[in-house]
Amino acid sequence: MTFLFPKVAILCIFVSVFTVFADDLRIPLERIANADKGSSVTVSGISSGGYMAVQMHIAHSKSINGSAIFAGGPFYCAESNLEFAQYKCMDNTLGLPETQKLVALTYTDASLGLVDPPRNLANDKVYLFSGKADTVVKQPVAKALRDYYESFQADVAADFDVEAEHCLPTLAYGEECATLSSPYLGKCDFDGAGRALQHLFYGELSAAGPSAAAGVGANLFAFDQTPFFVNDGLSSLGGTGYIYIPSNCQVGAATGSQCKLHISFHGCKQGIDRIGDEYAAHSGFNPWAEANDIVVLYPYAKVSNTIPLNPNGCWDWWAYTGADYGVKTGVQVRFVAALAKKLGWEL
């Protein structure tokens, strides 16, 4: 899934066209009511999206206080080097990620104002998942991420014992758990999204029962990402994103709910041009969001076969948008911050 570039010649990727009605694109961002705009934000992601979630957490740790990472590694693991990305931060041909070096880099970036002070990470809730059968991002990389977060005294919970391939594990959606196959959502009889959100929200969530599941289809909306682009020529960002807005968080809801914000990042080969809205619709976060008044924002990257070269539609974690890809000045980090601000949460 997160193969950055094929080991053989790169083949042209034919993009499927998904029809979205233009009149619907800007409406969802105006539908949110009852937002707890003073609350902290949480993030999650798988693979390249996991790396992106780590980058958002580290860059904005003053306002983001938790992350759930599926098959990802430490902050700036690739050190702006594609070879390191493939052979230190996916497999370990060149050795393991240099965790203490990356911790030191984090402190340096903070001293330059490129990321928030790492002291904000103390006691932050962090959930990690890595399948025992993952052949794409090997488990030692995820364990290096655990070491990285624990260096800052984060509260880390991890599931490393599931016989899963490279996927976000679900109860019953996707391909067989131990199979490496699109859409990289694994039918593992394991609720990865639920485990993640329960940890991030201190185990105080209501169960995602049948009533929550019944409402999820109608509350997932497409929206236009283009007004929030920082540099469209280099961003590899898609034109459309998705947002899940629970019934209690929509304009007109007769409720005293205080709605939280969670941001979730798809992985490589999980963009709209490959699998449509499957990540946003079926990764498992939405039933929990419905039951617990959590708005879930799903930003989307896209395939780019020119400049920047991003043939699998990955989030940037090896510098295809520039060396500042993972800090506050990075174009994708700024884009996500602009989206959150539009929703009412200042990062």
Image (spheres, rainbow, N blue to C red):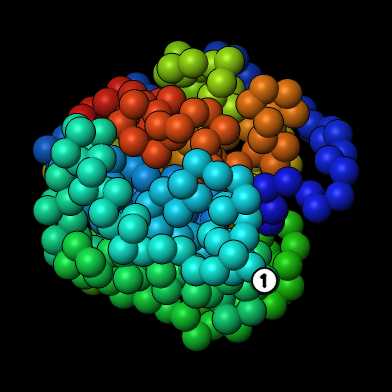
SS of the residue under disc 1: loop
The residue lying at 24 percent from left, 69 percent from top is 150
Q: Above or below — where is 157 with respect to 6? A: below
In the picture, the quarter occupied by the C terminus is top left
Q: Is residue 23 above or below residue 47?
A: above
Quarter occupied by the N terminus = bottom right
Judge from the rendering whether residue 257 lies leftward or rightward of residue 7; answer left or right.
left
Q: Does any portion of residue 9 appear in the rendered image?
A: yes
x 48%, y 60%: residue = 72
Residue 256 location (% of width, % of height)? 14, 43
Name the residue type under label 1. Thr
Q: Which residue is mark 1?
A: 135
Could you say which is closer to the camera, residue 175 or residue 144? Answer: 144
The percent position of residue 258, horizontal first and vertical second, equals 17, 44
Q: Position of residue 277 (x, y in %)?
A: 62, 42
Depth check: give the residue in front, 19 or 40. Answer: 40
Disc 1 residue crowd, few under 14, some 14–19, many 20+, Cα 10 Å: some
Residue lying at 31% horizontally and 63% vertically, measured from the top left? 100
Res. 247 visible in picture: no
Residue 297 is left or right of residue 189, and the answer is left
